[in-house]
Image: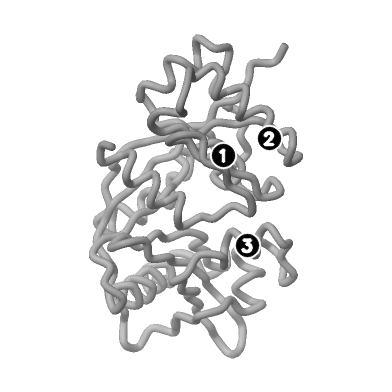
Amino acid sequence: MNDAEMLEHACADAWPPQVERALGGWRLRAAGGFTGRANSALAIGDPDGPVRRALESVCEFAHAHGIEPMVQAILGGPVEDVLASSGWVPHDDHPAGNEVSVLLGPLGRAEEHAPTRVLGTPTPGWWELTVGTTEPTDAQRHVLTGRPPAGFGVAEDGGSTTGAVRGVLVGDVLHVARLAVRPELRRGGLATALMGAIGGWAAGLGATRCALQVSVRNSGALALYERLGFREHHRYRYWVPAAP
């Protein structure tokens, strides 16, 4: 595997679906529709047969688990040509954004006086900020807490959760996701403090670098990560069968 493929597998390990089945090098995944990454087939390597037959298996798996067929493929990679010739199209209507930038950067440093801490389990305030409810679904809980070692960073003020982030260690890579700050407190340094807190936590466990996946439409997040030293490694996008 090349570097992009290895990094994609590390990111996939950090985002566990409720159900996963290997198809050669491909990974078929389902998690009740919660996020594209956990409900698509990661199409990397050889699916142990013709790609067109693999795409039939993707559809069969998706329908069996009540989700729409979708493939995650590295932008410009060899699978995209076969997807296009097999009647699949980029999923331009994906609500979170179809094209995603995968970033690599340094671990942040914890700020001694920042109002942040990293916990072993999420708090109700963490859930409210990252998924919009204090009572997550089984799928949300599995995807976000089902892969140890995981850290759940929170920023707090007077008992109120003002920011949150999730970090998972895969080998020496810290995978960061769900960075959120209350809207009225943005641009005040909380996001940077949270990145420092989760980076310091991961460094203590042997992490040497950090990976993020951000929609190319999210200009604010991309600008933040650029300031923190992150650079684009590659991109991926989602594909779906063309409408009949």
Determine the residue positioned at 46% across, 49% down. 12
Q: Which residue is mark 3?
A: 142
Decide: is 23 above or below 220.
Answer: above
The answer to which of 158 and 34 lies nearer the viewer is 34
- The location of residue 125, given as percent across then percent down, is 63, 76
Task: Determine which of the numbered discs, if any, sits on residue 28 in the image.
Answer: 1
Q: Nearer the viewer, mark 3 or mark 1?
A: 1
Asked if the residues shown at circle 1 and circle 2 are in contact, with their CB atoms under 8 angstroms apart, the answer is: yes
Q: Residues within 10 Å of mark 1 (few under 14, many from 20)?
A: many
Decide: is 107 above or below 216.
Answer: below
The type of residue carrying mark 2 is Ala
The answer to which of 49 and 155 lies nearer the viewer is 49
Residue 99 visible? The answer is no
Q: Which residue is mark 2?
A: 62
The type of residue carrying mark 3 is His
Q: Earlier in the sequence, mark 2 or mark 3?
A: 2
Determine the residue positioned at 43% across, 66% down. 167
